[in-house]
Image: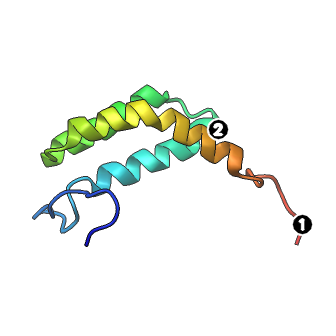
Amino acid sequence: MTIGIPDGIVDATTGRPKAYRASLVHDAIYQFLPDDLAMSRAQADRCFLALMNETGFHLRHIYYFAIRTLGGMVRLGIRQSREHQGSQVEL
C-alpha cells in the first residue's frame, strides 16, 4: 500500500523520482515568499511546472493545477498555524 502523493517513476539520470527536484525547489521557494523574495507565487508555480517538464513527469499538468488551486490556501494555513515565525528566542 502506498500512502501519499506519487513523485513518479525513478529518473535514470538522478536516481530520484521525476518530481523530486521540482518539489524540493518549489517548497524552498514557497518558504521564502513571505520574506519579500523577488518572485511571485505564480512564478514559483511556473518554475515547478518547468522542472517537471524537464524530467518528462507525466502528471505534471495535474500537479501544476493542484498547486495553483490549493497552494495559496495551504501556505496561508501553515503561516497561521505557526507560533514561532523566525523571531529571536533566548535560550
State the separation of the CA atoms marked 1 and 2: 22 Å
Identity of the residue furthest to the front in this view? 1
Residue 61 is left or right of residue 22, and the answer is: left
Mark 1 is surrounded, within 10 Å at the Cα level, by few (under 14), some (14 to 19) or many (20 or more) other residues, namely few
In the image, what residue occupies the spot 22% across and 41% down? 60
Residue 35 is situated, as x and y percent measured from the top left of the image, at: 64, 38
Tell me the SS state at disc 1.
loop
Which residue is label 1 attached to? 90
Q: Which percent across, then down, holds residue 57?
A: 16, 47
Residue drawn at point x = 35 percent, y = 51 percent: 23
**Element class at badge 2:** helix
Q: How many numbered discs sit on the rendered protein?
A: 2
Q: Is the N terminus in the top left, top right, bottom left or bottom right quadrant?
A: bottom left
Along the line of sight, which residue is nearer the eye, 50 or 71?
71
Label 2: which residue? 35
Seen from the viewer's position, the closer of residues 67 and 26 is: 67
Q: 44 left or right of 86?
A: left
**Residue 76 vs residue 32, the one in the foreground:** 76
Classed neighbour count for the residue bearing mark 2: other residues with Cα under 10 Å, few (<14), some (14–19), many (≥20): few
Looking at the picture, which amino acid does disc 1 mark? Glu
- Residue 11 falls in image quadrant: bottom left
Quarter of the rendering occupied by the C terminus: bottom right
Rendered image coloring scheme: rainbow
